[in-house]
Image (spheres, helix red, strand yellow):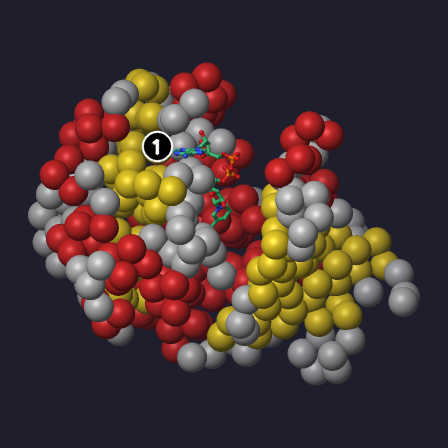
Amino acid sequence: MLVVTEEVCREVVGRDDAFTAVENVFAAMAKGDAYNFPVIREAIGYAEALYGFKSGFDRQGLALGLKSGGYWPGNSDKGLTNHQSTVFLFDPDTGQLRALVGGNYLTAVRTAAASAVSISHLAREDAKVLGMVGAGHQAAFQLRAAAEQRDFEKVVAWNLHPEMLDSLGDVAKDLGLPFDVKEREQLAAEADVIITITSAHEPLLMKQWIKPGTHIACMGTDTIGKQEIDPAVMAAAKVFTDEVAQSVTLGECQHAINEKLILKDDITPIGSVINGSAQGRSSAEDITVFDGTGVGLQDLAVAHVAANLAESLGKAQEISL
Ligand code: NAD
């Protein structure tokens, strides 16, 4: 089997690779060619950790396996990333373990690729101002991937902990984009595309602040109880997601569903838009929302690319069990 380290993943998997892999797997999910197995996520009663598995099979891309890992809040004190994960890929023809792939960098690029795919398919073509709500580990990846989707001329940003915004500003500078820190209401008034990528448990953006035509990629809410936007936004918007089952239970839509502001049938898998079987934005005035909950198939898709590229470039270690 192959061992593909974090370092090799960083070397071989670029944003374009991740975008294509995630776009393809969303399309395969919508066609019924790929499906996620039930997610396991448990508080293990040790080190305050949350640990679990996300798994699935993509019959089209032939990616079978799981991502195992979770969240260890004490890791930052040890100089480690709090989110830790590893991907196991199996040969769908034999069931043999094919590759062990570091999952930390890949989680960030696949999450950024998901919101980038949503911007590519749902945002107005003439979007000029990108709004960033959040400035943690994922935010830099999100900003870089989003910046490639439209001719943005400026980034406006807000974060609960303002001291974290400097490093996001450095990313914008690196991309040649002016970067302004704003209050949330002002950010919403200026931004044509907004990415939320926080650990918030209450709405950060209110419906009355969102201007017509805005596209919002809600990327932070991946657990029951988390929340980033006013649920009333969902009722006013055309709503899309990676997977409807996750969106209504642990994604941003959980709140609008619980408050009966929208129905499950109001949420469209983005894969159907990619396949052309569902309409995306229908007018320049539509507010569109992408509820990016994060599915195991995204992890398998990018890990599959990492394993293939690492093998073909001679960068994977080969061992037998
Ligand atoms: P991080 O710990 O590096 O950063 C957390 C961010 O949330 C910071 O910007 C912080 O200021 C902000 N924040 C923390 N508490 C807040 C609060 N109460 N209100 C508003 N903002 C708050 O985390 P990260 O790795 O950047 O991840 C950000 C979020 O994205 C996490 O909630 C994580 O679980 C989620 N995530 C989602 C996916 C997905 O596929 N949807 C994938 C990876 C991470």
Taking depth in this image into account, of 123 and 247 the one nearest to the observer is 247
Name the quadrant containing residue 211.
Answer: top left
User: Which quadrant of the figure has residue 182?
Assistant: top left
Horizontal side of 66 relative to 146 (left or right) equals: right
Tell me where residue 141 appears, x and y as whole percent: 49, 37
Question: Visible in this render: residue 300?
Answer: no
Residue annotated with mark 1 = 132
Name the kind of residue labelled 1 in the image.
Met
Q: Position of residue 38 (x, y in %)?
A: 53, 72
**Label 1 within 8 A of ligand 1 by Cβ:** no
Q: In the rendered image of this protein, does residue 62 appear above or below residue 296?
A: below
Q: Secondary structure at mark 1?
A: strand
Q: Position of residue 176 (x, y in %)?
A: 39, 22
Tell me: residue 18, above or below residue 75. Answer: below
Q: Which quadrant would residue 53 be assigned to in this image?
A: bottom right
Q: In this rendering, is residue 238 above or below 25?
A: above
Residue drawn 38% across and 26% down? 159
Q: Is residue 222 left or right of residue 183?
A: right
Residue 145 on image: x %, y %: 43, 40
Give the residue drawn at x 41%, y 58%: 250
